[in-house]
Image (cartoon, helix red, strand yellow):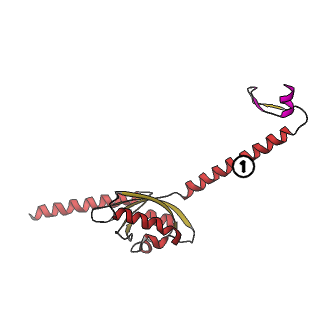
């Protein structure tokens, strides 16, 4: 019986070590919180992404790191999970230790014991890139509109073709001639 207990203990220790390696290697922010949303365990990606130490994060409610205006999303998620929802997703700005914030996309599921398993992704750079693309599209459309207006105001006929001799742009004077 003593050998069996030692073997079981070794298996449990090995399983715990495998879990910890897996938990720590993720680039996503992985965490476990209690039913009230108080963090009890976080991986190192939290400290790398947000600048807070693990000690500063653990034993604090998630809502402590979110502006009041955004706490409703967290409260709603916690309530949905308490009401039996299997998973809940939401995005909120989360305070960085330097004073700024990062946009975090949360995917949370509850265990039968009420623990919350959180997989969180920092979407800040993706959102900034998307906003930059949108801005570039708007600026391109504005410049295109200005170009069309300028070409259209020419008194002489104007035709612009691409490398394959396909018409790209012409003005009103050209259209009246042809």
Image spot of residue 175 (x, y percent): 83, 29
Category of crowding for the residue at label 1, using alpha-carbon neighbours closer than 10 angstroms: few (below 14), some (14–19), many (at least 20): few
Compared to residue 141, the image places residue 16 above or below, namely below
Horizontal side, residue 70 vs residue 37: left or right: right
Quadrant for residue 165, please give it.
Answer: top right
Q: Is residue 82 left or right of residue 51?
A: left
Q: Nearer the viewer, residue 47 or 128?
A: 128
Residue range (magenta): 164-178
Q: Which residue is mark 1?
A: 139
Where does the image place residue 18, in percent across and percent down from the top left? Answer: 30, 58
Q: Left or right? Give the position of 59 relative to 153.
A: left
1 falls in the magenta region: no
124 vs 178, left or right, is: left
Residue drawn where x is 48% and y is 71% of the image: 65
Closer to the camera in the image, 100 or 34: 34
**Exactly how many numbered labels are in the figure?**
1
Name the image quarter holding residue 157.
top right
Q: Secondary structure at mark 1?
A: helix
Picture quarter containing residue 61? Answer: bottom left
Question: Residue drawn at (27%, 62%), measured in percent from left and top?
Answer: 112
> Image quadrant for the C terminus?
top right
Regarding residue 116, the answer to whether it shows in the image is no
Q: Nearer the viewer, residue 10 or 35?
A: 35
Give residue 107's position: percent from left, percent from top.
41, 58
């Amino acid at each position: 019986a003593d050998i069996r207990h030692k073997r079981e203990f070794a298996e449990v220790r090995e399983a715990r070590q495998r879990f910890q390696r897996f938990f720590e290697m993720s680039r996503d922010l992985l965490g476990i919180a209690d039913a009230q949303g108080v963090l009890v365990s976080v991986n190192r990606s939290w400290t790398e992404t947000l600048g807070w130490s693990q000690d500063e994060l653990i034993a604090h409610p998630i809502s402590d790191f979110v502006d009041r205006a955004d706490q409703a999303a967290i409260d709603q998620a916690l309530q949905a999970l308490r009401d039996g929802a299997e998973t809940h997703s939401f995005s909120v700005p989360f305070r960085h230790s330097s004073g700024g914030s990062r946009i975090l996309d949360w995917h949370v599921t509850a265990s039968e014991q009420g623990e919350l398993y959180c997989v969180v992704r920092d979407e800040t750079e993706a959102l900034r890139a998307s906003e930059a693309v949108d801005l570039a599209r708007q600026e391109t459309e504005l410049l295109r509109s200005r170009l069309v207006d300028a070409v259209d105001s020419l008194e002489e006929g104007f035709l612009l073709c691409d490398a394959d001799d396909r018409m790209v742009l012409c003005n009103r004077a050209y259209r009246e001639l042809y």
